């Protein structure tokens, strides 16, 4: 019985050290652009898009934790899209959130707010115009 308690206590300690030893998931950069690299980071940064472009938002994270990344896209004050992705990283990662419109985006001012586990961590603004 004593051996069982010692093994159980050792297992609990190992789990706590492993969980507490890694840094929490942190957002390092929020990127906007028209295309992505192979690792899902943005290949060329821009804040000006045409109505037919796909707007790529890439959230770069570091740390060994996990969490839920979310985005809320707005055209003026109107919400035009929301999505979430559960992520679990060992180190550096990039997570892509594309915004597309089959009929094209109306010209104007847009914004996208990024959330980590439901808490706002940043906002980026961009424009859609007929010719960049």
Image (cartoon, rainbow, N blue to C red):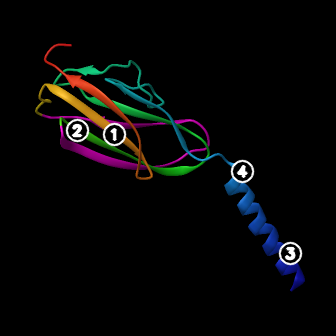
- Where residue 37 sits, quadrant-wise, is top left
Question: Mark 1 — residue?
Answer: 113
- Where residue 63 sits, quadrant-wise, is top right
Question: Mark 2 — residue?
Answer: 74
Q: Position of residue 15 (x, y in %)?
A: 72, 62
Sequence-first disc among 3 and 2? 3
Question: Mark 4 — residue?
Answer: 21
Question: Mark 3 — residue?
Answer: 6
Q: Position of residue 126 (x, y in %)?
A: 27, 25
**Mark 4 to mark 3: distance in Å?**
22 Å
**Mark 1 to mark 3: distance in Å?**
48 Å
Q: Nearer the viewer, residue 83 or 121?
A: 121
Give the farthest residue toward the top: 132
Q: Quadrant of the C terminus?
A: top left
Query: Residue at the location (71% across, 51% down)?
Result: 21
Give the farthest residue toward the bottom: 1
Would residue 7 be found to the left or right of residue 40 on screen?
right
- Where residue 102 sits, quadrant-wise, is top left
Sequence-first disc among 4 and 3? 3
Q: Are marks 2 and 1 in contact (CB under 8 Å)?
A: yes
Sequence-first disc among 4 and 1? 4
Q: Are marks 2 and 4 in contact (CB under 8 Å)?
A: no
Decide: few, some or many residues near mark 3? Use Cα within 10 Å; few <14, some 14-19, many ≥20.
few
């Amino acid at each position: 019985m004593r051996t069982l308690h010692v093994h159980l206590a050792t297992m609990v300690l190992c789990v706590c050290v492993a969980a507490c030893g890694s840094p929490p998931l942190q957002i390092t950069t929020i990127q906007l652009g028209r295309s992505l690299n192979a690792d899902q980071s943005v290949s060329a940064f821009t804040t000006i898009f045409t109505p037919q472009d796909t707007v790529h938002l890439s959230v770069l994270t570091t740390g060994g934790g996990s969490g839920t990344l979310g985005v809320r896209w707005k055209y003026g004050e109107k919400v035009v899209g929301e999505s979430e992705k559960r992520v679990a990283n060992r180190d550096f990662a990039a997570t892509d959130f594309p915004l597309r419109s089959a009929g094209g985006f109306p010209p104007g001012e847009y914004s996208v707010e990024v959330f980590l586990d439901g808490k706002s961590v940043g906002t980026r603004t961009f424009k859609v115009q007929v010719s960049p």
